[in-house]
Image (tube, rainbow, N blue to C red):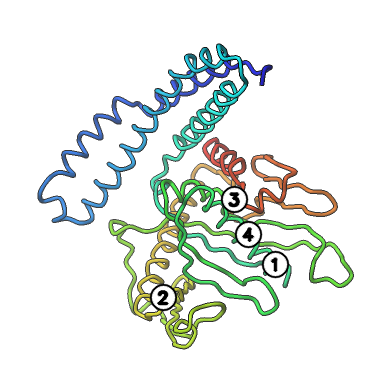
Amino acid sequence: MADRDFLGEISALERTLAGIESVLNLPDLERRAVELETKASAPDLWNDPESAQKVTSELSRTQSTINKVKSLKSRVVDLPVMHELAGAESGQSAMADFSKEVDSVTKAISDLEVQTLLSGEYDHRDALITIRSEAGGVDAADWAEMVSRMFLRYCERHSLSVNVLETSYAEEAGIKSTTFKVSGPYAYGTLSVEQGTHRLVRISPFDSQNRRHTSFAGVEVVPVVEQSDHIEIDEKEIRVDVYRSSGPGGQGVNTTDSAVRITHIPTGIVVSCQNERSQIQNKATAMAVLQSKLLEKRNQEERAKIDALRGDTSGSWGNQIRSYVLHPYQMVKDHRTDFETGNTQAVLDGDLDGFIEAGIKWRRSK
């Protein structure tokens, strides 16, 4: 701790925060917040629910950003004084506390810096994540379940709300697929960089000869639709099937045909929901998931047209994005950003911050 150049670190934090404030244009944000507050206080606001939802959502995000910047500015201003007071005390506890505060402010500013890169149309929304086992047999099914756990642990670390909508269990071990909704600020923008194929190399626990196996899991991330998105679905273009829920569940869930599977015939997109007891509730949830996937399909088609016009073939999210090697050495490496770590267990326990931050910066650079 004695070797740390705290004054240099504080100076760097001041410059970084000033840069973030310049990019965000705090005066404009404050003016926008006043405009939105005026609109939100209008007595006829909810006469148009779609417009009201946009106003209240943007107001919440704008106020949150302003409060974060002001809070961090205040904390950075206090750091030199805290450093002086800590240095004046004879014990080590004050300096240790000061060091923790510097680390905390550094992390908060880094998080805010990454958030400024999330300026996409849907980045602020909740996310729908679907994980599927791909090539690799039973190992792939087990790996898909491990990937699911990894994301659930990440959400837990960041206090993001998760609602598991559907899980299809494999016969021997693991899962065929699972879909869950992640709710929180910029959930989609943050987690969308995880979309793609995740590759695992390990000694298979299902191989009696202890041979090394490679297996794959696919991760799909789409934004949750809002009422204003206008994704029209013709009832004639969908097929609705009901079936009995499978896997772990409550007494009522597994004894009635309440689970719903919807197939969108023109695109072949299939969605399922089995987390509710009511067939009607499950159908409504499944329709919302289908709308999200159709919205993402529309966005992909629009991006493909733009890429075709500019000849941009880089950054394909459908390809393998990351390798998790557990044997003969320990390493997790992202093939887009080259970010890597040897602490594989921490990553599988949800420590994805470094990968996600690098991914967001990589995507912005493209």
Circle 2 Cα neighbour tier, 10 Å, few/some/many (<14 / 14–19 / ≥20):
some
**Circle 3 residue:** 316
Q: Earlier in the sequence, mark 4 or mark 1?
A: 1
CA gap between label 2 and label 1 equals 28 Å
**Circle 2 residue:** 276
In which quarter of the view is residue 67 placed?
top left
CA gap between label 2 and label 4 equals 24 Å
CA gap between label 1 and label 3 equals 22 Å
**Circle 4 residue:** 147
* Type of amino acid at the residue the image marks with label 4: Val
In which quarter of the view is residue 292 placed?
bottom left
Q: Are marks 2 and 1 in contact (CB under 8 Å)?
A: no
Circle 3 Cα neighbour tier, 10 Å, few/some/many (<14 / 14–19 / ≥20):
few
* Type of amino acid at the residue the image marks with label 3: Ser
Q: Which residue is painted at 69% across and 62% down in the image?
A: 216
Q: Which residue is painted at 25% across and 33% down in the image?
A: 32
Q: Dot 1 lies on which element? A: helix
